[in-house]
Amino acid sequence: MKELAEKYDSCASEAKWRAYWEREGIYKFDKNSKKKLYAIDTPPPTVSGKMHIGHAFSYSQQDFIARYHRMKGENVFYPFGTDDNGLPTERLVEKLKNVKSTKMSRAEFVALCDKTIKEIKPDFINDWKIIGMSCDFSEAYSTIDAHSIKTSQLSFLDLYQKDLVYQHIAPSMWCVQCQTAIAQADLEDKDFDSTFNDIYFTVENGEKIIIATTRPELLAACVAIFVHPNDKRYTHLLEKSAIVPLFHHSVPIFPDPSVQMEKGTGILMICSYGDKNDVEAVNRRQLSPRVVFTRDGKMNALAGKYEGLKIKDARREILHDLEKEKLLVTKKAIRHTVNVHERCGTEIEFLSTKQWFIKILENKERFIAAGKKISWHPEFMRTRYEHWIEGLGWDWCISRQRHFGVPFPVWNCKKCGNVLVADKNQLPVDPLAAKPKGKCSCGSQEFEGEKDVMDTWATSSVSPQIILNWAKDKGYDIDFEKMYPCSLRPQAHDIIRTWAFYTIVQGVYHEGKAPWKNIVISGHVLDPKGESMHKSKGNTIEPGEVLKKYPADALRFWAAGSKLGDDLRYLEKDLFTGQKTITKLWNATRFCVPQFADFNGKKGKMEAFDVWMLSKLQKLIVANTENFEIYEYSKVKSETEKFFWITFCDLYLEIVKDRLYNSDARGKEAKASAQYTLSQCLLDLLKMFAPLMPYVTEEIYQSVFKEKKSIHLESWPIADKKLIEKDIEKKGDEIIEIISLVRKAKSERNLSLKENVKEIILPMNEKDVAGFIDDFKAVTKAEKISFGNKLSIII
RNA sequence: GGGCCAGUGAUCUAGUGGCUAUGAUAGCUCCCUUACAAGGAGCAUGUCGAAGGUUCGAGUCCUUCCUGGCCCACCA
């Protein structure tokens, strides 16, 4: 047992224990262990420059849970992964290296991505180690490593064989900035200033009608006009045709019940394609589409004189021309919400392209059913999941016309165009570099590899399969069958519609069941005003900056303060509160340690206040265990903090000082009783703080107790119900109440607490509280204690 | 427009039917007491968003409304 230094040096201590944990493999997964498994489907953060405060927040929270389960004696499988493929990575590399992927060869760009990732990843991962994540970092994966590519391709082959994936030419969501197809889940809302324009069309009978639109550049793409069949204003126009202004092509006027009569002028122009309704309308009426722009968002030849202009420039020019030709009735400024691509903020368009889709619409019920089999924490997050599924309108488009991603294990026959998929044994495969095994059914051996890569979610959604070695290509065995489903998926609420949903889809399709037993949803970090943090708003907080001022334990302690699933404001004072708790823990230990010097570890007859204290401790253990079982780490934090600060420090430590300091007068046995209680409380408190503040608890444990290699390999305290003494607790509480009143009385008289009290008359039965009286007398500095009907404090 | 969550002292927050509503921060008063002044003791601060209702009893349950956040839809 070592004396503790006067001050806790968090900086040195945290670095020391971090290195120790890694060197000693404290968090290493033991694949041969017979203990109960607890597998965590860790979120792989998207590799970006640095960890942000939201990461620090949510990863701390999942780490509390992981550490609790480890201490509970479970075999925790807690790998660490990084998501480093796909569009987000491409955009990062473009930014860091100041290049444009569209202006480079694919091979060149992929090589640059690989190189850049290698450069920045070690520092990036280090941020996670600094906050004290207890992952097994030797079980690290990247969503672009060979194992992940193989798993992802295997997943594709399995879906292909089960007829759950298909290739299809159809109008789908397209980002003209990223020049790729995207999925419904990749959309975001954004407000734009625009104009609502009333434009004249001329019907074949010469009548002029007015159509309202925000997108006049789509006039060239107009293929029909819809009016409501019951709209008396326009029934006479039905089955006639109209001439599109500026472009002079003729389009039919159809009745269609989807038209909302009260909107705009009640006349709707159908373009190929302005939105999802247009897509459906064109299909329903079997119209031949007029596509007017190119994949990079410029007008094409069909747009006549506007060819080559960007969409927005064309809009301005066309409005200008309409105005000049007196075809524009009015132009109203409006602000409206438009769907944009979440990665770049560009308004999405609809283009007919050939894409791969995973079928999801036909199995909505199965996904909802699988969601019901999972325990959601908090429960209401399941509702969000179900609503997302109910609102889905498209199958999952998984192909991206990009460079850096998992390739489709697919070739097309050059002769007949047939699709050939790779053989399982070929994986991982790059179809641009390799050839399929065998021939096409047409006899040809000439193939063209699929150039598209997969949506990054297509790979991250098989994270359970990746970590549990579904592809069976890891160097050693992790028994997929035994370990699937995982025990836990921790993640934030903003990716329920993507990561959680897609992972469930893959789980249902590959394994016929949900991928995890529990899902814990964390919230977001807000700025001090309660607003969301955005780089553009300039209100972001960098964990690196926070950690220059405060220990990682304090950051974690702050992160433990949000109720499960709740957002939390970043207020610096809360970091300070955490730091105070660390200091207090340190100083309380500094008080205890010298008291253990002459302690033989044996307990004799226990003093009343010690029984009282141990009883309260057992109750805390029960409460904390229950709360951790339901993932309520914030309640563990507040309960433990309250107990430590008030019950242990303010009350108990003060009460036992007399017995410890004056053992000659009070007796060796009374001292031993206090020593025993102190050491029990301190050890159990350290253990219960350990998941939240792994560093300071380790530092203290290693100095004072050191029964195992690490406090994090210690067992979580188990409550001894026999120690719960309701009666003594109640009596003790009554005495405590009076101690408070004595303190208050001194305080009101502006006296020091060590001031003597002449006499205290207790309104109690002497026999009931006899065991407490010596301690009570000492802590209140009372010269005389007597018993009567009414409380009286005579100073 | 639909859904979800929330509205508690100056600020943030605990509290899913039961004695005078938690704790933290800021404020004020006192105390350098041999773990801790980055501390301790104490004080003050609340019509628990509004209105109805259920109940012996409501911050807690129900209804309606108001406000905020998030998600989704619409966006001719």
Image: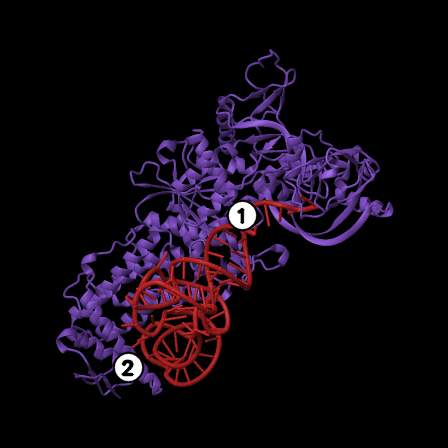
Chain colours: A purple, B red
Question: Depth check: A255 or A301 in front?
Answer: A255
Residue A644 visible to an observer of this rendering: yes
Kind of residue at badge 2: Val
Question: Depth check: A550 or A400 in front?
Answer: A400
Considering the numbered disc 1 on the image, is that residue within a helix, a strand or a loop? helix
Could you tell me residue B44's position as x and y percent?
Answer: 41, 81
* Snapshot quadrant of residue A791: bottom left
Are labels 1 and 2 assigned to the same chain?
yes
Residue A672 visible to an observer of this rendering: no
Is residue A672 toward the left or the right of residue A92 in the image?
Answer: left
At a point 30% along the width and 52% down the height, the residue shown is A716
The chain identifier of the residue carrying mark 2 reads A
* Snapshot quadrant of residue A200: top right
Q: Is residue A7 above or below residue A137?
A: below
Could you tell me residue A165's position as x and y percent?
Answer: 53, 28
Could you tell me residue A141's position as x and y percent?
Answer: 48, 38
Label annotation for residue A124: 1
Is residue A385 toward the left or the right of residue A692 in the image?
Answer: right
At a point 74% along the width and 40% down the height, the residue shown is A218
At a point 17% along the width and 62% down the height, the residue shown is A603
Q: How crowded is mark 2: few (under 14 residues within 10 Å), some or many (20 or more)?
A: many
Label annotation for residue A742: 2
Could you tell me residue A756's position as x and y percent?
Answer: 26, 85
The chain identifier of the residue carrying mark 1 reads A
Kind of residue at badge 1: Phe
Q: How crowded is mark 1: few (under 14 residues within 10 Å), some or many (20 or more)?
A: some
Earlier in the chain: of badge 1 and badge 2, it is 1
